[in-house]
Image (cartoon, rainbow, N blue to C red):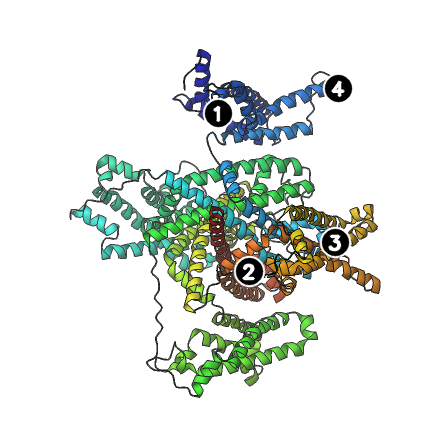
């Protein structure tokens, strides 16, 4: 553009300089960024007490200088904003810039407001202190006002000065929100409705529970803990009533869906953003890797040997892997004190260590020599370049600690445990053979922009919320740790629990009311921040697997018989057991429900009081189930020659007996007959353990709803990617277990007050592994670590995202694909996009009273829109009144008569509305133009539940029937479902669930099998364990805790050794079970988004 005056030319240069659009702007940008970071660090440290006064003076001086610097910058930006191209395009007239209007618009822009927010608090603070001193009529009076401390938080807005100018983090979030705001609103409505209803249920169950200490005294106070439950957190898991435990199990199942819905929306949004970024960066240079020049000389042959080009070289690689595994195993055993009694074994591992050092040293020297066949590492300087590569450093670290210790060359005093732990670095030598971290590095590099954006946003939120929680909770006496130190004593202290909150954890729950609101907001934000890596890393790893390792689809060939089977008695028996006849179908359903009956029988059998009162009932269930399962086993054995799996093989009945399902069938009935034949024998001695074999009947459900078979196919088809991620996860698991052992083995705190200290939990590496794996899965039931331990947990929070998100994406996509293949194989018609098309009746526009009522109730004209808005606010008002009525203090102050009168009005309005909808149903498309359709629909049920509690309460009161005050109040909360008439949110979610129905059903039965099986396992292994407080003394209680574990919340962690092994297995299973529905909902939301886009285009 032309420069109109010399001053305009200077202004233009200043504008380009401040925005780093010229050659010298970088010299302003870098100091600005460093000054912003320094300001944030000083602000955090300024909240810590105990520093020297001179340090605080330095903080104040830096603050004064920063305000002066940013004030000058703001003035210059305001002055030069007349040359801002964006505003100049808007306000230029006749090719002449309007400087005044441009500056005025810039003053109210986002960047200007952020700049003002970063400097104005300083001036407000100075003014408030001046007024205070004047009021006190004293010179030098300094009063640290609470308002002044609050204003200091606004200094953190200096971090936001980076937004837009140098990074685009929150801008990306804003774009995703704008693109999906309709889905977010409707999903938010569903989540809010579920939240309100479950809050009422928890209030009803726990309001009189003395262990809760008034935490559930009203629906409002219950809502915070319910929100935590919906995020998969159960901070009061040990104190619930029986009804509260049932509600918690139900909530844990819903939590996965709630989390999956929002993860699907934001994950898809970020996945699309990453795809756009990749298109824009399509011209990036690709790294050229030089190929080795093999000439047949000694150096070339050595290279071929070391890098697996020959058969002998591949054998050498396997031998190296075996040596590395032995080294790791020896280190783990060496950390266990009681292993010292096995001196021969420990001496063996010491010899392995000596041999390993010799082998690794020779390997390093040979690689250093042989790598010269590659042009980029040839010659002296090429070797120097190789010396700095990742593989060379790993090889050197594998042997260097040994020689430094042997010849006492350490430059500082080191602990023997530290030296031994360095052996774990030898695991990284496996990278030369499996290339795992190379793959991760490629994925991170390809998505570095998006991950940097999300990382910046997460850092800003972390610091901001830590400061807010510090101000709100620093004087809360309920938030003092077992060491006597307050969790929010300073901002650095507050950053640890806030980090866990932003990761979706709620280790502390007794916040102030405003602190609970902030904690809930962090839980909501945690969904978005967790969705980003799931969408990015999972998608990136899937792309790698697709590009480099194409999946081989299994061709399922079902052998067909040369001739049709003869219709004899065996044929009819086979048809019966396969459920292909009417009686066979009934028999199959009986088997299906008997499986659940036996699970119930086994669970109740562990409750002494229930067993004593209903012993005959339990015995009858057992007798009937054994007889029916025996009949099924005999019939299947008899008809085995016609089973497609054995029909073309010799001795089909013998093959059936040794098959998987036949063994399960036999193990479920054999112990019962054995006790009848040999009473008081070995079976009776281990009767309880053998009774657990009856749970294997759950595996029989796989015949009817394939789940285990499908997950097996998923692992087979994705074995390579899962093996790669599994290896990486194992490496990190062992490394972090070792580091946690080193930092916490002397920590004598007992945060759970069950007699188990942190030192006992981390007494050796194997003991530390179960706790570390729980942390790596994203859960933190223990938070009272040392400073070094907290830093390691911070790193584990970051690694947990990748460890969970990458296998989640692989398993979820694989399970969805395999489930669809199984559905096609069975010849079942997909129900996706199949909507019943109801023809409009001819009388639709007959101008009758019913049609006029329907017009009023539908938002098709102005009257309908007005009525809809009125009802929306009325329903919201009524729900708020129900919440307020649940608070005893508010009810006592306002009076029961007010709430009773209000409920009478609401009951009559909802009754009239229900009658009107019934009358207008023949003209309502959603009711299928039928009154019966309306009465049996979701809308009809919701409308009925809206007024039914009012009449029930009137009836109970009139008849003098005693009833719980909370029950009708809870039922009134169901009125929130009436909002569906006006938002159609549940309809949208229903479409998403229908699109992923097959996957969700199969996953549900797989989760059921793992849930019940693990619960029985904990019952057998940890029954009577004092460290878990009787959590597994009976199977119903064990089922409750196991359901909580599967949701990702570990309310108990101090298991027996075998219980720790089971817990580790359950962590891995939980990741898989979590990933499948989240991935299915993720894909389903992508389909819904595509359909919505097509509808907009049409």
Crowdedness near tag 4: few (<14), some (14–19) or many (≥20) residues, C-alpha within 10 Å: few
The location of residue 592, given as percent across then percent down, is 54, 73
Residue at the image point whose x is 50% and y is 32% from the top: 163
Ranked by sequence position, the earlier of labels 2 and 3 is 3
- The residue singled out by tag 1 in the image is 32
Q: Which of these two is toward me, 373 or 169?
A: 169
The tag earlier along the polypeptide, 1 or 4, is 1
- Judged from the image, the secondary structure of the residue bearing numbered disc 3 is helix
Judge from the rendering whether residue 804 lies leftward or rightward of residue 253; answer left or right: left
> Mark on residue 430?
none
- Kindly identify the residue that appears in the image at 41 percent across and 41 percent down: 276
**Residue at mark 4:** 136
The residue tagged 2 is 1056
2 or 4: mark nearer the eye: 4
Q: Which residue is mark 3?
A: 909
Q: Does any portion of residue 235 appear in the rendered image?
A: no
Task: Check if mark 2's residue and mark 3's residue have beta carbons within 8 Å.
Answer: no
Residue 112 falls in image quadrant: top right
Name the front one of labels 1 and 4. Answer: 1
Are the two marked residues, 4 and 3, in contact with CB atoms closer than 8 angstroms? Answer: no
Looking at marks 2 and 1 on the same chain, the residue that comes earlier in the sequence is marked by 1
Q: Position of residue 482 (x, y in %)?
A: 64, 45
- The mark closer to the camera, 2 or 1, is 1
- Whichever of callouts 4 and 3 sits on the residue coming sooner in the sequence is 4
The residues tagged by marks 3 and 1 sit, at their Cα atoms, a distance apart of 62 Å
- Local SS, label 4: helix
Residue in front for this viewpoint, 904 or 884: 904
Residue at the left extreme, as displayed:
296
């Amino acid at each position: 553009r032309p420069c109109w005056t010399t001053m305009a030319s200077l202004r233009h240069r200043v504008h380009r300089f401040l925005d780093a659009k010229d050659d010298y702007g970088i010299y302003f940008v870098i100091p600005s960024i460093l000054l912003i970071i320094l300001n944030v660090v000083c602000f955090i440290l300024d909240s810590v007490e105990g520093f020297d006064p001179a340090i605080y003076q330095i903080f104040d001086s830096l603050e004064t200088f920063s305000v002066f610097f940013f004030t000058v910058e703001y003035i210059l930006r305001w002055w030069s904003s007349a040359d801002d191209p964006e505003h100049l395009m808007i306000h230029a007239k006749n090719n002449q810039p309007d400087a005044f209007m441009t500056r005025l618009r810039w003053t109210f822009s986002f960047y200007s407001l952020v700049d003002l927010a970063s400097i104005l608090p300083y001036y407000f603070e100075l003014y408030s202190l001046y007024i205070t001193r004047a009021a006190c009529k004293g010179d030098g009076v300094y009063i640290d006002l609470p308002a002044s401390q609050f204003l200091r938080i606004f200094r953190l807005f200096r971090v936001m000065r980076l937004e837009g100018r140098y990074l685009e983090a929150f801008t990306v979030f804003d774009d995703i929100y704008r693109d999906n705001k309709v889905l977010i609103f409707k999903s938010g409505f569903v989540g809010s409705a579920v939240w309100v209803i479950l809050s009422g249920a928890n209030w009803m169950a726990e309001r009189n529970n003395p262990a809760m200490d008034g935490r559930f005294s009203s629906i409002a106070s219950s809502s915070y803990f319910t929100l935590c439950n919906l995020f998969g957190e159960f901070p009061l898991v040990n104190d619930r009533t029986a009804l509260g435990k049932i509600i918690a199990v139900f909530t844990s199942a819903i939590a996965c869906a709630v989390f999956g819905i929002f993860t699907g929306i934001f994950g898809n949004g970020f996945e699309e953003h990453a795809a756009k970024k990749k298109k824009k960066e399509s011209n990036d240079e690709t790294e050229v890797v030089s190929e080795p020049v093999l000439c047949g000389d000694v150096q070339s042959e050595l290279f071929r040997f070391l890098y697996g080009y020959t058969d002998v070289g591949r054998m050498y690689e396997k031998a190296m892997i075996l040596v590395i595994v032995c080294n790791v195993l020896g280190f783990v055993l060496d950390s266990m004190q009681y292993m010292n009694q096995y001196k021969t074994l420990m001496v063996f591992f010491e010899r392995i260590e000596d041999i390993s050092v010799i082998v690794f040293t020779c390997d390093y020297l040979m690689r250093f020599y042989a790598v010269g066949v590659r042009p980029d590492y040839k010659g002296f300087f090429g070797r120097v370049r190789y010396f700095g590569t990742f593989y060379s450093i790993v090889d050197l670290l594998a042997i260097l600690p040994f020689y430094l210790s042997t010849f006492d060359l350490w430059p500082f005093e080191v602990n023997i445990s530290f030296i031994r732990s360095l052996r774990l670095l030898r695991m990284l030598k496996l990278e030369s053979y499996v290339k795992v971290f190379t793959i991760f590095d490629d994925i991170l590099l390809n998505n570095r922009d998006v991950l940097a954006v999300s990382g910046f946003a997460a850092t800003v939120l972390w610091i901001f919320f830590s400061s807010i929680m510090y101000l709100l909770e620093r004087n809360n006496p309920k938030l003092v740790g077992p060491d006597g130190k307050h969790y929010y004593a300073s901002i650095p202290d507050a950053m640890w629990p806030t980090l866990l909150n932003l990761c979706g954890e709620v280790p502390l729950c007794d916040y102030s009311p405003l602190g609970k609101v902030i904690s809930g907001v962090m839980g909501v934000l945690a969904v978005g921040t967790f969705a980003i890596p799931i969408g990015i890393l999972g998608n990136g790893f899937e792309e790698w697997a697709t590009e480099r390792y194409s999946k081989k689809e299994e061709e399922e060939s079902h052998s067909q018989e040369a001739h049709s089977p003869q219709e004899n008695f065996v044929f009819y028996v086979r048809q019966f057991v396969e459920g292909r006849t009417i009686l066979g179908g009934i028999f199959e359903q009986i088997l299906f429900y008997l499986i659940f009956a036996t699970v119930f029988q086994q669970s109740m059998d562990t409750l002494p009081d229930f067993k004593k009162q209903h012993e005959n009932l339990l015995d009858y269930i057992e007798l009937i189930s054994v007889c029916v399962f025996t009949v099924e086993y005999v019939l299947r054995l008899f008809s085995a020659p016609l089973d497609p799996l054995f029909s073309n093989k010799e001795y089909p009945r013998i093959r059936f007996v040794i098959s998987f399902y036949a063994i399960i069938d036999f193990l479920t009935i054999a112990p019962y007959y054995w006790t009848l034949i040999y009473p008081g024998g070995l079976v009776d001695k281990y009767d309880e353990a053998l009774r657990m074999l009856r749970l294997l009947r759950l595996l029989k459900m796989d015949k009817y709803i394939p789940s285990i078979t499908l997950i097996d196919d998923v692992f087979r088809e994705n074995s390579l990617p899962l093996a790669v991620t599994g290896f990486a996860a194992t490496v990190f698991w062992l490394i972090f277990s070792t580091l946690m052992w080193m930092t916490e083995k002397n920590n004598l705190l007992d945060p759970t007050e069950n007699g188990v200290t942190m030192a006992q939990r981390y007494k050796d590496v194997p003991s530390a592994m179960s706790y570390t794996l729980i942390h790596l899965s994203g859960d933190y039931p223990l938070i009272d670590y040392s400073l070094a331990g907290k830093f390691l947990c911070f790193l584990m929070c970051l690694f947990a995202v990748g460890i969970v998100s990458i296998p989640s994406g692989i398993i979820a996509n694989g399970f969805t694909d395999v489930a669809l293949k199984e559905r096609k194989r069975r010849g079942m018609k997909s129900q996706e996009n199949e909507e019943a098309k109801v023809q409009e009746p001819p009388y639709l526009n007959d101008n009758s009273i019913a049609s006029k009522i329907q017009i009023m109730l539908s938002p098709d004209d102005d009257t309908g829109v007005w009525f809809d808005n009125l009802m929306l606010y009325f329903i919201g008002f009524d729900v708020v009144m129900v919440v307020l009525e649940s608070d005893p203090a508010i009810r006592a102050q306002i009076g029961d008569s007010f709430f009773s009168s209000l409920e009478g009005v609401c009951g009559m309005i909802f009754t009239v509305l229900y009658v009107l909808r019934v009358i207008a149903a023949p003209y309502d498309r959603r009711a299928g133009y039928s009154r019966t359709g309306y009465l049996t629909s979701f809308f009809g049920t919701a409308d009925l539940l809206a007024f039914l509690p009012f009449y029930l309460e009137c009836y109970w009161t009139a008849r003098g029937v005693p009833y719980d005050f909370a029950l009708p109040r809870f039922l009134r909360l169901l009125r929130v479902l009436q909002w569906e008439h006006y938002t159609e949110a549940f309809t949208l979610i229903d479409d998403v669930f229908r699109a992923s129905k097959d996957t969700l059903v199969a996953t549900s039965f797989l989760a059921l099998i793992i849930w019940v099986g693990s619960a029985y396992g904990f019952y057998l292994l940890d029954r009577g364990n004092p460290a878990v407080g009787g959590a597994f003394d009976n199977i119903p209680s064990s089922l409750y805790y196991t359901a909580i574990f599967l949701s990702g919340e570990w309310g108990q962690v101090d298991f027996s050794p075998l219980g720790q092994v089971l817990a580790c297995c359950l962590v891995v299973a939980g990741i898989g079970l979590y990933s499948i529905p989240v991935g299915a909902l993720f894909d389903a939301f992508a389909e819904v988004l595509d359909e919505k886009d097509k509808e907009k285009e049409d």
